[in-house]
Amino acid sequence: MLAALLMACIFATPAYALEVRAYLDRSQVPVGQAAALTIEAQGEQNVQAPNVAAPAGVEVRYVGPSTQVSFVNGQVSATVSHRYAVTARRVGRFTLGPFTVSHDGRDYQAPAVQLEAVAAAKAAQGAPGRDQIQLEISVPRQRVYVQETLPLTVTLTVGAARIEDLQYPTLPAEGFTMERFAEPNQTREVRDGRAVAVLRFQTTITPLRPGTLELGPALARMALVVQGRRGRDPFFDGFLGDYRKEPIEVASEPLALEVMPLPESGRPPDFAGAVGHFSLEATARPEEVRVGDPVTVRIAIAGEGNLAAVNAPVLAAGDRFKAYPPQEVGGGPAKQKVFEQVLIPLRPDVTEVPAVTFSFFDTQAGRYQTLRSGPFPLAVRPAEEAQGARVVEADSQRERERPAETLGRDIVYIKEAPGEMRARGGGSLGLRLALGLLLPTLAYAGLWWWVRQRDRLRDDPRYARFTRAGREVGAALAEARRRLASGDDAGCDDALSRALRDYLAAKLDLPPGAVEAENVARRLGSDAGATAAQVANVLGLLERVRYAPSGAARDERESALRQAEEIVAALEKRRYPSGRGASAALLLLALAAATLARADDPIAAFYRGNALYAEGRFADAAAAYESALAGGQESAALYYNLGNAYMKDGRPGPAVLNYERARRLAPADVDVRTNLAFALEGQQLAPAESPWWKLALPLAERAGSGALAAAAVALYALVLAALAVRLLWPAARTPATRAALVAAALLLFAGANLGYRVAVYDLAEDAVVTAAGETPVRFEPSDDGTAHFTVVEGTLLHVLETRDGWLQVARGDGRRGWIPADACTRL
């Protein structure tokens, strides 16, 4: 019952209003060539083809229908398109239509279309189809202000032409800044009764100075596909014609914009160049603090305009606060900028955080606007006497007291080179391993097949004769055709008869004297009736032409030779399927290999971090290393240097986090292990002890997943190489078998280490405590839950479950509990 309902939902067509339209694929054609007329009915699938009246001098031929059914968001849409070939027999302009489509007792009309037929000589002038390609620049308005962002569209319209190798357009824009073009939006539209393809490239521009500035002309490079004539029917030339590519450039008309300066009157004192239309939202948290505790003011500016030029508003903190510079933070929507500023109240009589103001020039209203949010109430209590006033910062700005280092001990210095970069997360390891195992397997399979064919050709005369027949018949038929061309009719008859009979005898395993029409038909079977009939016809022709006068049967000899070639082609195709499967497999391998191409390494950010580290600017160095990671690349050296920067900046939690990440990429690096042990010792933490059973898999602790995967692939290739030697040289089977067994044992050992490392390190959900001080781990995911135990910054935890901003974790000693998710960072 349920299946029936589902089928009814899918195949039931709702009662849409029928929409009918008609269009030509091109509005101008040479005399004698065909244009494609399409009459499309959208809303139903069983609409009959309308009768199209042909004006004098035009021939209209119905080609056939095509249907389309789509199921989107629970709605079924059905469309039927009826296609006609329209051929003009003389020069002139013709009107086709209007067209009437009848359905369910109602008539629907599509407007008429125009077709212009020109002389063939005129149509041949210039590159065919070049005039069907147009490029245009458009903007919503041509009067703008300085620094006002403006959407721009470059539209490419392609009519009755075929293009390939299209490049993104180039657009000279002196006096503007311009974003990169987004992926083009492609649609198909009907203009003036003909279908055109429309590609829209969109971007935004920002004028930098007032005056009349010119954009363009835009230039698009592409290849125009020019078609030669082969088919007898011009309508099908698109399927049968020869093609060549002709590189062309299409230019648009330039576009002038009037750029107005920003007015001087009414300009607010705090205006910093923001132009557009914006909104302001600000908060101050927490609302109750002690003297010396931080208050974070979060400011969000959103809207349409030059957000790149928007700077953080400045708070008038005065002498009541210690104010740190505002910092831009990410994570918001695309058309929004978020800033955070840390304020430290210095006196207990502070009652509010000052209001935030932001001024901009509103392009919609044509005047300056000032937005205001706040002030924000704040309760400040005196600092605790035992503790005194302590000044701290938000995570992005805090400057902690550096830990006292033991005399004669310190962390090992940073790495000078970034090492081998890879995509963050190492998601391509599985694909690389699969390709590494697949390629030797394919090579060995190909070798096995070749050896099997070699041995079979040597040991099976019937199979050898069958295999050679295809190659030998080609030379024999070529000899028969050469004798026919030279006038040697008797030699042609003998060569053709011998070639065909030898080929059929070998292919169908018939004795040389038994190649008769009945025997051939019986061996071919019922599924090859046409081929059997051709064989009978050719054999009959050969018998007749033997007794015909010289030259009188030349047409029949030509026909017999052509049919013999068709018979050979049919049997070869039947016995040997095409190689499309292999070609597709090779193409998939090439595409998979292409996905392994790496993005450009963020080397510049790495070396900038090294320079800042050498100057003692450890917080800035950490920010530089983080920006390198934000580019999507990682390396053990990058994580190691980032851990050093955090360690020197007095942040042991992030330091341990990045040392752990470096250790997982480079387990054998002594510097990484040394600095990790130093950081854990400073937090009075002991490194995790390895269980005794890890001794059986020592490589899992000392080699990365990539190295172990490479070793496994190399050993697998060695096993197949030994088997290949055993296959090719039977005399070496014993030593080759021993070598294969040894390599297989090593492969199992490497595979076990790789599997353990992937399961325990790469796929494990681990996290490091990065919150300062001691963090309670509670019995339940609630701030009111009873504390089970506490963890300090830098503690490694195993994540068991995630729930509503909490993590259920397990410590190394087996204790479990719940910790806030923002107190940890996952590896």
Image (cartoon, grey):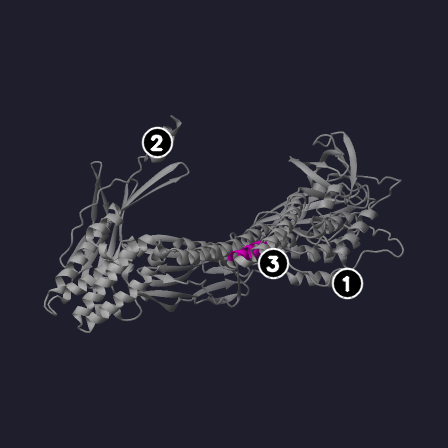
The label number, if any, that marks residue 8 in the structure image: 2
What is the residue that sits farthest to the bottom in this orientation?
Answer: 486
Label 1 – label 2 distance at C-alpha = 72 Å
Image mark for residue 273: 3
User: Which residue of the protein is positioned furthest toward the top in this rendering?
Assistant: 1
In the image, the segment drawn in magenta is: 713-727
Q: 650 or 214, which lies in front? A: 650
Judge whether residue 341 can be spotted in this image: yes
- Between tags 1 and 2, which lies in front? 2
**Residue 157 in the image: x percent, y percent?**
36, 59
Callout 1–callout 2 Cβ contact below 8 Å: no
The amino acid at mark 2 is: Ala
Q: Is the magenta stretch mostly helix, strand or loop?
A: helix
Whole-number angstrom distance, CA of label 1 to CA of label 3: 36 Å
Q: What element carries label 3?
A: loop
| x 45%, y 63%: residue | 169
Question: Of marks 3 and 2, which one's residue comes earlier in the chain?
Answer: 2
Q: Where is residue 508 in the image (x, y as percent from the top left)?
A: 28, 53
Quarter of the view holding residue 293: top right
Looking at marks 1 and 3 on the same chain, the residue that comes earlier in the sequence is marked by 3
Q: Observer-nearest residue: 133 or 273?
A: 133
As drawn, 37 above or below 492: above
* Disc 3 to disc 2: CB gap under 8 Å: no
Q: Circle 2 sits in a helix, a strand or a loop, which is it? A: helix
Identify the residue under disc 1. 614
Identity of the amino acid at label 1?
Ala
Residue 96 shows up from this direction: no
Q: Which of marks 1 and 2 is nearer the N terminus?
A: 2
Q: How far apart are marks 3 and 2 (CA)?
A: 61 Å
**Image coordinates for residue 70, horizontal then vertical, percent:** 36, 41
Amino acid at dot 3: Gly
